[in-house]
């Protein structure tokens, strides 16, 4: 059996479909490029039939990404499979992932189909998918709660119909390591046709066991793991890409297996996802959390200084966390910034470098020491955050506990068409007053669903990253902003959303004018 475990990353599909993690097409492409440079074997780019936006994102990713296989999810029906086939058409290597539920509960209450009917649908789905590509993956949704003899029957039929990857999802995060290892050992040795296909694990984290279960499936013979960066996904999420990869990597002695992941890119990919979706990574998150390589207690620090292996099983550099932390100052030039960005995992285009450089110089004027985390925040702000049409010209807030006066914000915005508009607003809090002033100036009354700020470096001049989630009557958006001033960071995050809404309206007008 091969020693290579394929990494099938579903950040852009299972991850993106979770509430609070939706991404625009452009953001998905950006992330797909990062996953490609990370060495992900298969990128599940979306669910083509879900919406025209999902279809377009998959199609664009398929046209641009050549280093990974691009996959679209499809239920076992003609419409879904044809949409997936069309969406992956431009791919150098494209896969259709078709699925149908097989467990008794899903058969009876969701599908209302007999066992025979489900087998017929599975076979027809795989056969239709094969007319678009030789690379067809078949999943039995809720496989873990499916009777073993019936699971065997469906899987054998799918293999005969032409599926080359068989995925066994733990859709509801119910299994345990011992159980799933046993199931994979059975499937990979007892199923007719098992030798010619790759078995895949897709574990959800409802019991906090997704990574452990995926590793156990690998011990049982799985050679593909489906996972998502930062563990995002339906409900409690999917198996975390960074965790399963680093477990296989760090415990080569035990698993004797490899993945194709260039692990030094992990940290940057995790940061990019957090920044795009506005969901910060918890400090104590394995591999990519801020504390993952921090040693606070005296005993630990003493041990690490004597020999880092006393308390470190991985080197921070292995996942792209730099220990060479203090980097640039106000005299540093573009080349140094570009070089540092590249070490942090960001390849900046000339245009991006220019805007990050301007922001860097402003920051270097404000701060004596510019740390890697500051630079990351700047890059995220300048390249992931929006670039107009609005920008903040000036902002001033007053706040306090005087019961006769409300917090007040005075905001001036510049539009790229040359207008400069101002508003003064009062509200229960200064951040709210700022948001209201921005809404008044731009004419976008948004509902604020959540607002969070976290500092990315230490000290009184630390950079703050703000994330907002807002909604209109029809849609929900997230935006982000970074600054040494927390209120300004919040204002930038709010304006990021408005800029996106306005840019999209302009694009839509252009498209309408062309037709
Ligand atoms: O969890 C699940 O069952 C899935 C399938 C569609 C593979 O995401
Ligand atoms: Zn899933």
Image: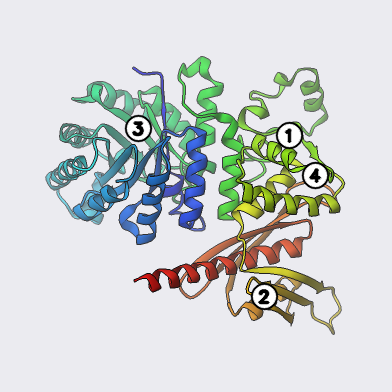
Q: Earlier in the sequence, mark 4 or mark 2?
A: 4
Crowd tier of the residue under label 1, counting other residues whose Cα lies within 10 Å: few below 14, some 14–19, many 20 or above: few
For the N terminus, the quadrant is top left
Res 234 seen here: yes
Q: Earlier in the sequence, mark 2 or mark 1?
A: 1
Could you say which is closer to the camera, residue 154 or residue 200? 200
CA–CA distance between discs 1 and 4? Answer: 19 Å
Furthest-bottom residue in this view: 404
* Residue 346: image location, x then y, percent: 61, 41
Return the residue at label 1. 294
CA–CA distance between discs 2 and 3? Answer: 55 Å
Q: Earlier in the sequence, mark 2 or mark 3?
A: 3
Q: Which mark is residue 418?
A: 2
Q: Circles 2 and 1: CB distance less than 8 Å?
A: no
Q: Which mark is residue 370?
A: 4
What colouring does the structure picture have?
A: rainbow
Q: Earlier in the sequence, mark 1 or mark 4?
A: 1
């Amino acid at each position: 059996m091969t020693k290579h475990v394929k990494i099938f990353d579903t950040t852009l599909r299972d991850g993106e479909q979770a509430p609070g993690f939706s991404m625009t097409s452009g953001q998905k492409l950006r992330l797909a490029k990062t996953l490609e440079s990370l060495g992900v074997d298969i990128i599940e780019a979306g669910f083509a039939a879900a919406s025209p936006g999902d279809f377009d994102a998959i199609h664009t990713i398929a046209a641009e990404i050549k280093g990974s296989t691009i996959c679209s999810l499809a239920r076992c029906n003609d419409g879904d499979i044809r949409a997936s086939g069309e969406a992956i058409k431009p791919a150098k290597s494209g896969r259709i992932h078709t699925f149908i539920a097989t467990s008794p509960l899903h058969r009876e209450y969701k599908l209302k189909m007999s066992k025979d009917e489900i087998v017929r649908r599975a076979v027809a789905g795989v056969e239709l998918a094969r007319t678009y590509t030789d690379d067809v993956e078949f999943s039995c949704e809720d496989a873990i709660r499916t009777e073993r003899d019936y699971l065997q029957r469906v899987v054998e039929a799918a293999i005969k119909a032409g599926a080359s990857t068989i995925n066994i999802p733990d859709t509801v995060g119910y299994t345990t390591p011992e159980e799933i290892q046993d199931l994979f050992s059975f499937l990979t040795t007892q199923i007719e046709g098992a030798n010619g296909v790759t078995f895949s694990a897709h574990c959800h984290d409802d019991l906090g066991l997704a990574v452990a279960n995926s590793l156990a499936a690998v011990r049982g013979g799985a050679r593909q793991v489906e996972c998502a960066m930062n563990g995002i996904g339906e409900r409690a999420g999917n198996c975390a890409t960074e965790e399963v990869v680093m477990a296989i990597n760090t415990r080569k002695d035990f698993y004797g297996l490899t993945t194709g992941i260039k692990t030094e890119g992990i940290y940057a990919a995790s940061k990019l996802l957090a920044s795009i979706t506005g969901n910060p990574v918890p400090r104590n998150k394995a591999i990519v959390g801020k504390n993952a390589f921090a040693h606070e207690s005296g005993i630990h620090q003493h041990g690490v200084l004597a020999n880092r292996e006393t308390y470190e099983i991985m080197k921070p550099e292995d996942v792209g966390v730099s220990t060479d932390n203090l980097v640039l100052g106000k005299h540093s030039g573009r080349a140094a910034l570009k070089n540092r960005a590249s070490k942090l995992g960001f390849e900046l285009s000339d245009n991006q470098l220019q805007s990050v450089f301007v922001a860097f110089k402003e920051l270097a004027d404000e701060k004596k020491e510019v740390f890697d985390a500051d630079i990351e925040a700047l890059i995220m702000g300048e390249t992931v955050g929006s670039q107009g049409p609005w920008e903040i010209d000036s902002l001033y807030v007053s706040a306090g506990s005087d019961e006769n006066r409300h917090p007040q914000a005075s905001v001036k915005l510049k539009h790229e068409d040359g207008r400069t508009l101002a508003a003064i607003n009062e509200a229960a809090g200064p951040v709210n007053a700022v948001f209201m002033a921005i809404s008044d100036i731009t004419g976008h009354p948004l509902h604020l669903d959540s607002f969070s700020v976290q500092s990315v470096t230490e000290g009184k001049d630390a950079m703050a990253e703000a994330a907002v989630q807002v909604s209109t009557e029809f849609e929900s958006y997230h935006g982000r902003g970074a600054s040494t001033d927390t209120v300004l960071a919040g204002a930038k995050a709010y304006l990021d959303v408005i800029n996106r809404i306005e840019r999209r309206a302009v694009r839509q007008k252009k498209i309408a004018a062309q037709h």
